Structure formats: structure tokens, C-alpha cells
């Protein structure tokens, strides 16, 4: 059997004219890739701190008209994130999506590769599932492990992805080693003093303090945070943590 | 020619999502490797430019939710295409999709050689409008096969790899898609002659 001929080449005249004027599917631009990656990173990060639906609303506000997605995100809680420095193994660098069209992404350099952590285990209880998913102990890196500093300034997208990854590690540590989680939030604070996920970091820190039994500290820190979060998307969750509710 | 779809896929698409069976990749890794594939697939399934960002994000929410269920028994791209198909189908079902045709979505002239003849440009625009109308009435799967083969000029093998079916199945689906396209086109042209469609 041989490949069928295309209508645009050998079809009836009206069809040939119609199909020859058809625009081909357009590949992603580099900007679109960066923008969508940032959005995926943002919602993944928000899920990492157990406030997926809330933070996703932020993304929706930016993207406009994403209310439907927020509904979907509210059901999202599997912990499958890994540090962005671990993404894009060479084996999955490309896809056949751009076949038939040249993608401007093809020349993009691959990010550095490092092993991603294993997945987190299911939530221990429905009540806490929205905030915490106790991970496998294997997914937790030692808190003392130094976080390598970037040799060069990161782009905004890369920086956000790294923030998200670091917070995911912190979140993953909440279940087995909340002290490690707390330390990772401190690493985040020192590494990304002006990061975009500061509020998410504080939520993880509050949860870690609560799990460590440092309720008073959590309350003090949470109340200070409330001043910044008032009227915001995280206010309810912070109040919940401050009150000690699961 | 081979009938094995996987033989025509790029290594990336064949790679299991669990390296060594132990380390699941993240949604960000899937995005890094396959964002363009999802982007193109949604367009092939009829998602307009103005909706592309939102639907793209919707796909990745599903990916994030379902990633742990992917066992590598099919190509990643086949799995992703299935998600794109369901997301696009849900999008199409929404009433506003059928009612609204934003001005920004009127066919543009991307990829058209520059011309100083307005009549030529008008003809191109009209042809694209007709094409979009017809494609929008086709079954999504048929539409996708039709667009991949007839417009994007992908090979049957490449389409088979994306869909996770044998090449013979692609040809069969292409035949059905062509019949549907021509039937819908004839119906549209008859309606236009009667003045039913503006």
C-alpha cells in the first residue's frame, strides 16, 4: 500500500483551492512556551501548598476567563511535582507536535537535569487533604542539603519554576519531617527574597510550625501574615492554620 | 513503510513517564517536552487562538491530575492527544462556542504571501472562513486526522504514532474524514446559495 495523495495536490479544483489557502497549524513561539510554563509552574506551586484552587484563581485572573479551570483545579491534588532543575530529561525533550511545521522551540537549550523525587503518598485524612499530602520519606531531601545557587541570573520563568520546585520539596517534607520543611522555607526566603511565591512559602511554614507543635509561633506568624493577606485568596486558609484547624 | 506507530515517533514520545520505574516525571517535565505538541493538537481539534491559552492550561491540569495513571503502555503523545480530544470536545459542547464568533477569530492571512491585490486577499480570507466553518462541523477525531494529513501534511506514520493506531487505521479514518468534509462542504455551499448562511 502507498501513502494516499493529498486533496490539495490531486483533489477536485474547489477543494484544492480551499486547502491550499489553509493556514498550517502554528507551533508555539518561545514566548508562548515561557508564558505557559510559568502558568503551569504557578498552579503546580499553588497545589504544592494545598491551596490549588485559590492560587489558580490568581492565574485565572491573570489569564482571564479561567473560572472553569479553577473548578478543575479544585480537584487537583496529586503530588507529582519535581524540582524544575530536574525536568526535561533528554529522553523526553521533544515531541511530534511540531511535525509539519518548524518550531522555534527546537533550538532551545535543555535545562540542567537532576533526579526528580518520587511521588508523595495519598493524604492521610480527607480533612487535611486540601493542605497536606504526606509524602514518601524517600521524597524528602535532607534539610541540611545545600541548595545550589544559580551561576547566572535566572529568567523570570526559570526563577518561578525553581521557586515552585523548592516549595514542592518543602511541602513534600511536611508529613515525615516538618522541621525539614520549615528549613526549606527558610532556604526559599533567603534564595528568593523577592520571590513570587512568598505567600505560598508562608503557608508551608505555618503548616510546618503547627505540625511541630509550635502553635504559638504559628499563631504569631500567621497573624502577621494575615495583615498582608487580608481580602486575598489565602486569607481563609491562613485563618484556618492560625486557629489550629486541620 | 511500517505499520508500527511507535516506530515513527520521536524518542521523546516513546519514553516512559517513569524513569527506571521509580521516578515519576512532573507536569513541568511533560510541559517542557510536549508543550508544542499539545499546542498544535488543540489547534488541530479546532481550538481558536483566543481560547488556546485557557484550553492549553486545562489540558495540563488534567495531566497533573492523571499523570500517576500513565503507565507508559502507549506513547506520551497518544496519551496527551486523548486528553486534548476530551478537553476540546468539552469546549465544543459549551453553547457559547457555537454561538460566538469573535472578530479576532475571523481567519487571518498568516502565511499568505504578500499581495497588493485586495481581491486576492479577500478570496483567501473567504476560503479560510469556509474551511473553518466546515471543519467546525466535523467530528473532532475526523477533523484532527483531516487537518493533520491534508493541511499540516503529516505522514500517515506520524499520524498513526500520535493516535496510537496502525497506519491502516489512519487511512481508514482519513477516508471517513474526507467523506464527511466533502459532505459538510456541499451542505454549506447549498445553504449559502439559498442565503441561509451569511
Image (cartoon, coloured by chain):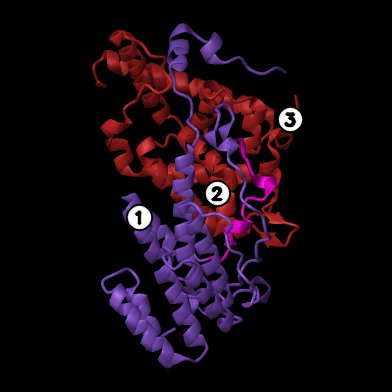
Chain colours: A purple, B red
If the image is split into quadrants, where does the C terminus of chain B sit? top left
Query: Is the residue A169 above or below the residue A224 in the image?
Result: above
Label 1 marks a residue whose chain is: A
Mainly helix, strand or loop, the magenta region?
loop
Question: Are the residues flagged by discs 3 and 2 from a single subunit?
Answer: yes
Residue indicated by mark 1: A60
For the residues labelled 3 and 2, the Cα–Cα distance comes to 28 Å
Side of B70 relative to B146 (left or right): right
Residue indicated by mark 3: B3
Residue indicated by mark 2: B31
Instruction: Tell me which label, 3 or 2, sits earlier in the chain.
Output: 3
Query: Is there any visible trace of residue B127 in the rendered image?
Result: yes
The image quarter in which residue A117 lies: bottom right
Q: Residue at x 58, y 76 (%)?
A: A173
Query: Is there any visible trace of residue A51 in the rendered image?
Result: no
Q: Say which element carries label 3.
A: loop
Q: Residues within 10 Å of mark 1 (few under 14, many from 20)?
A: many
For the residues labelled 2 and 1, the Cα–Cα distance comes to 19 Å
Q: Which residues are magenta?
A: A78-97
Query: Is the residue A29 above or below the residue B120 in the image?
Result: below
Q: Residue at x 32, y 31 (%)?
A: B105
Side of A35 relative to B188 (left or right): right
Side of B175 relative to A239 (left or right): right
Amino acid at each position: 500500500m502507498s501513502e494516499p495523495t493529498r486533496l490539495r495536490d490531486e483533489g477536485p479544483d474547489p477543494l484544492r483551492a480551499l486547502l491550499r489557502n489553509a493556514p498550517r497549524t502554528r507551533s508555539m513561539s518561545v514566548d508562548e512556551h515561557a508564558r505557559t510554563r510559568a502558568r503551569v509552574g504557578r498552579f503546580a506551586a499553588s497545589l504544592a501548598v494545598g491551596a490549588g484552587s485559590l492560587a489558580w484563581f490568581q492565574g485565572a485572573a491573570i489569564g482571564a476567563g479561567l473560572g472553569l479551570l479553577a473548578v478543575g483545579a479544585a480537584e487537583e491534588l496529586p503530588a507529582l511535582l519535581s524540582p524544575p532543575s530536574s525536568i526535561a530529561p533528554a529522553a523526553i525533550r521533544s515531541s511530534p507536535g511540531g511535525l509539519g511545521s518548524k518550531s522555534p522551540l527546537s533550538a532551545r537549550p535543555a535545562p540542567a537535569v537532576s533526579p526528580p523525587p518520587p511521588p508523595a503518598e495519598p493524604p492521610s485524612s480527607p480533612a487535611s487533604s486540601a493542605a497536606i499530602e504526606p509524602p514518601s520519606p524517600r521524597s524528602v531531601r535532607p534539610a541540611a542539603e545545600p541548595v545550589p545557587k544559580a551561576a547566572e541570573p535566572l529568567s523570570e520563568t526559570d526563577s518561578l519554576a525553581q521557586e515552585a520546585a523548592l516549595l514542592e520539596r518543602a511541602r513534600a517534607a511536611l508529613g515525615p519531617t516538618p522541621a525539614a520543611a520549615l528549613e526549606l522555607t527558610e532556604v526559599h526566603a533567603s534564595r528568593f527574597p523577592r520571590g513570587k511565591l512568598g505567600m505560598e512559602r508562608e503557608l508551608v511554614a505555618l503548616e510546618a510550625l503547627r505540625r511541630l507543635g509550635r502553635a504559638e509561633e504559628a499563631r504569631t506568624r500567621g497573624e502577621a501574615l494575615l495583615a498582608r493577606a487580608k481580602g486575598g485568596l489565602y486569607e481563609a486558609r491562613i485563618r484556618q492554620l492560625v486557629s489550629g484547624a486541620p | 513503510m511500517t505499520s508500527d506507530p511507535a516506530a515513527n515517533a520521536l524518542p521523546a514520545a516513546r519514553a516512559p513517564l517513569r524513569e527506571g520505574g521509580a521516578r515519576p516525571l512532573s507536569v513541568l517535565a511533560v510541559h517542557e517536552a510536549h508543550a508544542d505538541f499539545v499546542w498544535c493538537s488543540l489547534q488541530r481539534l479546532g481550538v481558536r487562538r483566543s481560547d488556546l491559552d485557557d484550553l492549553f492550561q486545562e489540558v495540563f491540569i488534567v495531566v497533573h491530575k492523571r499523570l500517576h495513571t500513565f503507565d507508559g503502555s502507549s506513547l506520551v503523545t497518544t496519551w496527551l492527544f486523548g486528553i486534548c480530544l476530551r478537553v476540546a470536545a468539552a469546549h465544543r459542547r459549551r453553547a457559547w462556542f457555537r454561538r460566538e464568533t469573535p472578530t479576532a477569530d475571523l481567519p487571518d492571512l498568516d502565511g499568505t504571501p504578500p499581495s497588493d491585490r485586495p481581491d486576492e486577499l479577500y478570496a483567501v480570507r473567504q476560503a479560510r472562513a469556509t474551511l473553518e466553518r466546515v471543519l467546525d462541523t466535523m467530528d473532532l477525531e475526523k477533523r484532527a486526522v483531516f487537518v493533520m494529513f491534508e493541511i499540516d501534511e503529516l505522514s500517515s506514520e506520524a499520524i498513526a504514532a500520535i493516535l496510537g493506531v496502525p497506519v491502516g487505521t489512519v487511512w481508514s479514518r482519513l477516508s471517513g474524514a474526507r467523506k464527511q468534509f466533502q459532505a459538510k462542504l456541499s451542505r454549506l455551499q447549498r445553504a449559502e446559495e439559498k442565503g441561509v448562511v451569511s
